[in-house]
Amino acid sequence: MPKTVLSAVLLVLACLLVPLGALSTWAKHEIGDRDGYVATMAPLASDDAVRTAVAEEVSGAVMKEIDAGPLQGTVEAFVHDAVRSFTETAAYRTAWDAANRAAHDAVQSALNDDTNGEVVIDLAPITEQIKRQLSDDGVPLASKIPVRHTEITILQSQDLGQLRQCFHALQVAGVWPAVAAALLAVAGVLLATRRRRAVVATALGAALAAAVLVAAVAIGRALTLDDLPSDVSRDAAGAVYDALTASLRTAAWVLVGVGLLVALGAWLLPRLRRLR
């Protein structure tokens, strides 16, 4: 095989591996790692849509156990306000992190196994805190509220289908596709007859591949929200999706920018030399 053909093949493979490298690194270290997952989900404790969804779920579960007679509506509003106020406290953020740490194993199982259940965050620790607060405030029968599993859905695992196998493969691959992309790019440029042109083409190809990844993440968001059940908050689900894919989107945009800058620099360098 001529060197020029081999160079072209290596450079094309390098460009194709750019989005795969970003995806596999994200899947391994952002989703697969428990601490990384909890850190990613932690800012959602302050997200208004998520706090509203949590308040509605917890207050609804609590009110199923309280019979206040003609004052039911008043007590329900009080409970909802109490839950909403609790979502602004440090104790809530601690409970949120604990719930997400417990949910991580369920997320991994949904992405790697053939189970068809829902992936949920158990809000029981938050319900326990609310029970104590209501008891302290003198709400009737609050001390007798059973702390059952109150759940908020974050993933419909039955909708993943064949994506499970791809995601599992990405987690197994880890950072190696990104390493392979870099090595193939270097080898392809070294074998090229016109190396500057090869650098420009590779940088533009990598930028294009990363831009496709940005578009894929956006399309995935739209499809995910469109498939949500009617009783699931779209705003909260969108916030969760954005949090989970934030580092992936950032990495993709960085690759787009770096690719364009490298291509521009390689194209301008000989022209600047001639001007001098």
Image (cartoon, rainbow, N blue to C red):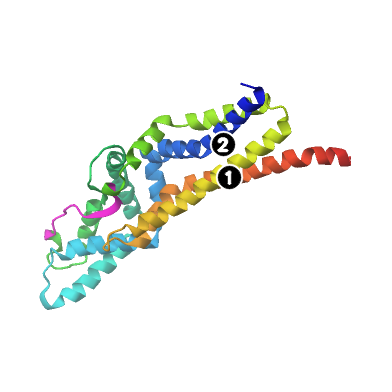
Q: Residue furthest top?
A: 1
Asked where in the image residue 185 lies, by quadrant, the reply is: top right
State yes or no: discs 2 and 1 in contact (Cβ < 8 Å). Answer: yes
Q: Is residue 153 magenta?
A: yes
Residue 102's disc number: none
| Residue 56 falls left or right of residue 267 | left
Q: Name which residue type carries label 2.
A: Cys
Q: Which residue is mark 1?
A: 208
| Residue 110 falls left or right of residue 144 | right
Give whichever of 35, 135 is nearer the camera. Answer: 35
- Dot 2 crowding, Cα within 10 Å, few <14, some 14–19, many 20+: many
**Spatial separation of the CA atoms under disc 2 and disc 1:** 8 Å
| Visible residue check, residue 177 | yes
In the rendered image, the quadrant that contains the C terminus is top right
Q: Which residues are magenta?
A: 144-157
| Visible residue check, residue 88 | no
Q: Give how far across and how far down residue 187 sits, in percent.
A: 62, 25
Q: Residue furthest bottom?
A: 70
Q: Name which residue type carries label 1.
A: Leu
Q: Which residue is mark 2?
A: 15
Q: Residue at x 38, y 41 (%)?
A: 31
Q: Give how far across and how far down residue 138 sits, in percent.
A: 18, 67
| Residue 157 falls left or right of residue 75 | right
Q: What secondary structure is marked by label 2? A: helix
